[in-house]
Every structure is written in structure tokens, then in C-alpha cells.
Image (cartoon, grey):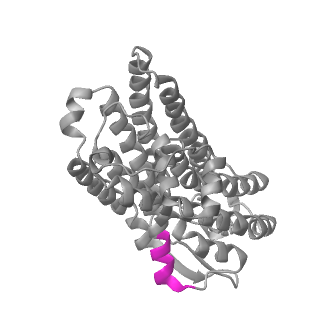
Amino acid sequence: MSSSSTESFEVETSNFYYYYENYNDAPKPCSKESVKRFAASFLPVLYTLVFLVGLMGNILVIVVLFKYKRLKSMTDVYLLNLAISDLLFVFSLPFWSYFTIDQWVFGTPWCKIISWIYVVGFYSGIFFIMLMSIDRYLAIVRVVFSLKARTAFHGLITSLVVWLVAFSASVPELVFRESFDEHNHTTCKPIYRGNFTTWKLFSTLEINILGLLIPLIVMMFCYSMIIKTLVHSRNEKKNKAVKMIFAVMIVFFFFWTPYNIVIFLQLLEMIGVLRDCQVSRNLDYAFQVTEILGLFHCCLNPVIYFFMGEKFKKYLKMLFKNWHLPGDICQWCGAHITYHTESTNSFHTQSTGDQDAL
């Protein structure tokens, strides 16, 4: 997976030699100077914005979880891990931001580590969104089974599995990423020795399948069953629940599908199916835009799973009750509540039909 838009800036003529038996059939190098200039002025600002918003939002989620929720349910465990995933994701952005402005000055070890952290955050974040969909499915559709299944212990076990899968899927970043000089410019990107086409194909399919196809299928199944159950129930909050469910699906699909489509098209370019230079430039522009779109998704996770829920508004107001400005902000966003201390039981009680956890 590309951890930075600069990976696609330089098109090496030698790369094309993998795909053409006749040297004379190889395409001429395609200039990407305009793409690099666009990235240098466009990406650092957006990387910084995503970093600041994602950092503040997800830290708030973690603080609220530890201070008020106490991690006594499967949902709380998944929310915590999702916030940690997003923090890993945004942690790498200052490095890529500097890279787009100048060049990679942090050496090969940090090139590998930062790329690995970025990809681990990418996969784990998507996997935990998928797990939360399953959690909601069990809570609403399989109510009796969920009484035994939806425990904090089971949440911890499945979370460990997710982290192991994310770490394993990200190993190629540690193996292939290197910092090296290219056209008097130090860069950080994968160097696939041996069969370049095979590794690039594997990398792209891995992202498309693990990062989009499987999670999307699972989410569509879970939420379609949830909607079917809620439509036939007499729950007064079902309309709000259905809206939040659609929000989760639409946001995930909207923010990540374009990115997956672009990297698949870039694969077609690299294997020689797409050869036009202007098409190549347009794909580089599209890659930058869709990557930023995907990055913004980690900023929206706190909004989707917390800020739209009444309970989080209450906890946030309690957290900021001695801070005048944040209190005004909470009142502005609609959190008009009365301060009171809840009992420990009220914090820890699981309700299989509770829609605020969405």
C-alpha cells in the first residue's frame, strides 16, 4: 500500500521494462513535475488538518472511555481499539507532510517504521469498523446469543486477532520499504526485487480484498439484517438507529471505495494496460485526492460512533464542566443536559438494544 502520494510521482523507465519484451516498445518517461508541484502545495495542509482533527477527536474518545465507560462491554473495547488504530494512522502524517514539501530525510529505518505504522492503522481501523458492525448485529438481531457472546473478554480476544492480522498484512512494508536517492531526490517507497509484477499485484489485491471487499460484504449483511429487524420492531428509537446505520455504511463506502478503485487502475497502468501519459498524470492526481478522502475517515469515526450518540454528549459535557469554552461548544452542539453523577452500574450495564453505541 502507498503510504504517501509521492510514491507515484516518479515513473521510472526501468519499471516499464518488466512489462515489455521489446525494449523499443517501452514507453517514454512521463514527466510528473506538475503532479509534484500540486502535491507540495495541496497535501501538507490537508495532512496537517487530518492530523490535528484526528488526534483531538480520538484522544477525546479514549479519555471518555477510560473515565466513564470503564471498558466493561465488547462495544467499548472495539471503540477503544478503533481510536488507537486511527491515532496510529494519523501519527505518520507529519512525516509524509514533510516528505511532500522536501524529500525523505529520516533514513531507511524510519521509512520502514512509519510506512508500517500507517498500514497497520489502515487495516486495523477498517477491521474494527467491521467488528463493530458484527457487534451491532449480535446486539439487535441475535439478542439471546449476544448475552453470552458480547463480553469484554471476547472483545479483547477478537481485538488481538485483528491486530495480528493487521500486523501480518503490513509486513511487506517492513521488508520492501527503503530510503534511497532517485534523480537527486531522496525518496521512501517499496523496492520489489525479483518479480516486480507479482508483488505489485499482491499488494493491490490485498488492499482491495482486505481493505474494502470483505469489510463491505460483512457490513452490508449485518446492517441489512439490523434494518430488517428494526423495521419490524416497536422501538421508538428505530428511525434514529436506521439513520445512523446508513451513515456508517455510506461514509465507509464513500471515503474508501474511490481510493481502492484508483490503486487498481494504477496497477493496470504499471502492467501496461494503460499507457497514456496524461492518463497516468490524472491517476496520480486522483490518488492524492482519494487518499486524503480516506484519511478524513479516521476523523469521522469519533463523530459516527460517539458524537451522534446522546450518551457521549453527556459524558463530554461532564468532562468539560469546569472548562467554560468547551462547555459553550457542547451547548451549541445540542448537549443540553444537567450535570449529575451516574452510578457505577449505569456505566457498566449492557443493553442489547442500545443504539447509542453506534
Q: Quadrant of residue 10?
A: bottom right
205 part of magenta stretch: no
State whether residue 214 is above or below residue 227. below
Q: Which residues are magenta?
A: 106-115
Residue at screen point 45% across, 72% down? 176
Q: Is residue 48 left or right of residue 173?
A: right
Residue at screen point 54% across, 41% down? 308
State whether residue 147 is above or below residue 190. above
111 part of magenta stretch: yes
**Predominant SS along the magenta part:** helix
Q: Quadrant of residue 278?
A: bottom right
Locate the C terminus and report the quarter of the image it occupies.
Answer: top left
User: Which one is nearer the viewer's eye here, 145 or 281?
Assistant: 145
Q: Is residue 221 left or right of residue 272?
A: left
Q: Quadrant of residue 194?
A: bottom left
Measured as percent of width and height from the top left, residue 39 is found at 74, 66
User: Which one is nearer the viewer's eye here, 315 or 283?
Assistant: 315
User: Which one is nearer the viewer's eye here, 108 or 48?
Assistant: 48
State whether residue 185 is above or below residue 164. below
Tell me, yes or no, if residue 236 can be seen here. Answer: yes
Measured as percent of width and height from the top left, residue 321 is found at 53, 59
Measured as percent of width and height from the top left, residue 75 is found at 34, 45
User: Which one is nearer the viewer's eye here, 37 or 180?
Assistant: 37
Tell me, yes or no, if residue 273 can be seen here. Answer: no
Residue at screen point 45% across, 49% down? 126
Measured as percent of width and height from the top left, residue 282 is found at 75, 53
State whether residue 22 is above or below residue 74. below
User: How many numbered marks, from 0 up?
Assistant: 0
